[in-house]
Amino acid sequence: FVRDDGWAGWTIEHTTGLLYVSRATPGLMTQTLPVLAGEQVQVVGIALQEKIILWNPSYELVEIS
């Protein structure tokens, strides 16, 4: 588990709690799922609370076609 009080606050809903590698800002996470062809998707965790996540990177990398 990771807590960071500096986060603006993650969405905790069942379908939007997933965290992805950010395409726009390398090294950061986002809850915006990439949708453009050629973009790659990697889940890195799930939001449990607004400031707490379960850090569990997936080794699977999916490319949007």
Image (tube, rainbow, N blue to C red):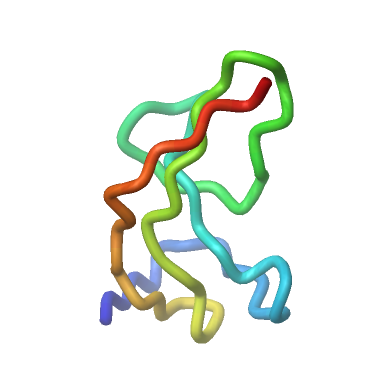
Is 29 placed above or below 63 here? below
When asked about the image quadrant of residue 14, the answer is bottom right
| Total marks placed | 0
Across and down, in percent, residue 9 comes to 58, 69
Q: Quadrant of the C terminus?
A: top right
Identify which residue is drawn at 36% across, 27% down. Answer: 26
Q: Quadrant of residue 39?
A: top right
Q: Nearer the viewer, residue 25 or 45?
A: 45
- Quarter of image, res 42: top left
The N terminus is located in which quarter? bottom left
Q: Residue at x 36, y 46 (%)?
A: 60
Q: Residue at x 50, y 84 (%)?
A: 48
Residue 31 position (above or below residue 46) = above
Q: Position of residue 33 (x, y in %)?
A: 66, 43
Between 6 and 41, the residue placed more toward the observer is 41
**Residue occupying the far top of the picture:** 38
